[in-house]
Image (tube, rainbow, N blue to C red):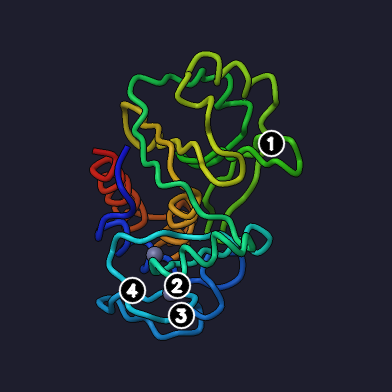
Amino acid sequence: MADDASPLISKLRKMSRSNGSNGSPASKREATSKTTTEAEEHCDFCSKSIPPNHRHFADLNNMKFMCACEVCTVMQAEKGEFHPLPQRYEFIDDLEMPETMWAQLKIPVNMAFIVYNSDREQPIAFYPSPAGSMESELRLDSWESLKNDNPALKNLAPDLEGFMINRLDKPHEHFIVPIDCCYELIGLIRMHWQGMHGGDEMRDAVRDYFKHLKKQCG
Ligand SMILES: [Zn+2]
Ligand SMILES: [Zn+2]
């Protein structure tokens, strides 16, 4: 288990946010702000500048994610308006997802993340596309059996943590990460997608993302 976001992940986060518009995780304020790749991060509640390691909150209704300074983290936790995001970045070694389960999802790209949606009482697989994230419902019995075979998935926080699947290269990689990290990937792919199938630039960006993510997991 690693601490909060490394500078690298923060940078990726910023990259995907600065490109945000409809359906992306970027907050309105960030979506309209200028792209400032090297700028330091700021608290989304009080605008104070913050170090790379800081807490995040989620507005699940609008799928917006906010950075918080220490003071605002305490205040927001008391208020309870937004959900504090877990800080777990875990690489799940030797997880094998049955090919039949992956096929059942009918996901046209080699990556996805699964989040248990507590409102719908349903695990949902999300995958990136040039238009943002797309959904595919996972059968509950498939999800239960996957959890039974892989204890690491049993305590996945509903709505707030994602089970990330990377099948771009072999061996396939699996992670448990906060959902803002999942949506960063969606934003990154939107930003780099070219042509019918995404293109090499997109794939390089995705490989880079997973490389950093794996490092983050330690
Ligand atoms: Zn603040
Ligand atoms: Zn942040």
Residue where numbered disc 1 is placed: 137
- The residue type indicated by label 3 comes to Cys
Instruction: Assess disc 4: are there few (<14), some (14-19) or many (≥20) residues with their C-alpha within 10 Å of its C-alpha.
Output: many
Asked which quadrant contains residue 18, the reply is bottom left
User: Residue at image x 62%, y 60%?
Assistant: 80
The dot on residue 46 is 3
Q: Nearer the viewer, mark 1 or mark 4?
A: 4
- Across and down, in percent, residue 3 comes to 30, 47
Locate the C terminus and report the quarter of the image it occupies. top left
**Which of the 4 image quarters holds residue 123?**
top right
- Whether ligand 2 has any atom under 8 Å from the Cβ at mark 4 is answered as yes
The circle on residue 19 is 2
Specify the label residue 212 is tagged with: none
Which of the pair 185/161 is nearer the observer? 161
Residue nearest the observer in this picture, 100 or 73: 73
Q: Residue at x 63, y 37 (%)?
A: 116
Res 41 label: 4
Q: Nearer the viewer, mark 2 or mark 4?
A: 4
Identify which residue is drawn at 58% across, 26% down. 103
Q: Are marks 2 and 4 in contact (CB under 8 Å)?
A: no
Disc 1 marks a residue whose amino acid type is Glu
Instruction: Pick whichever of labels 1 and 2 is earlier in the sequence.
Output: 2
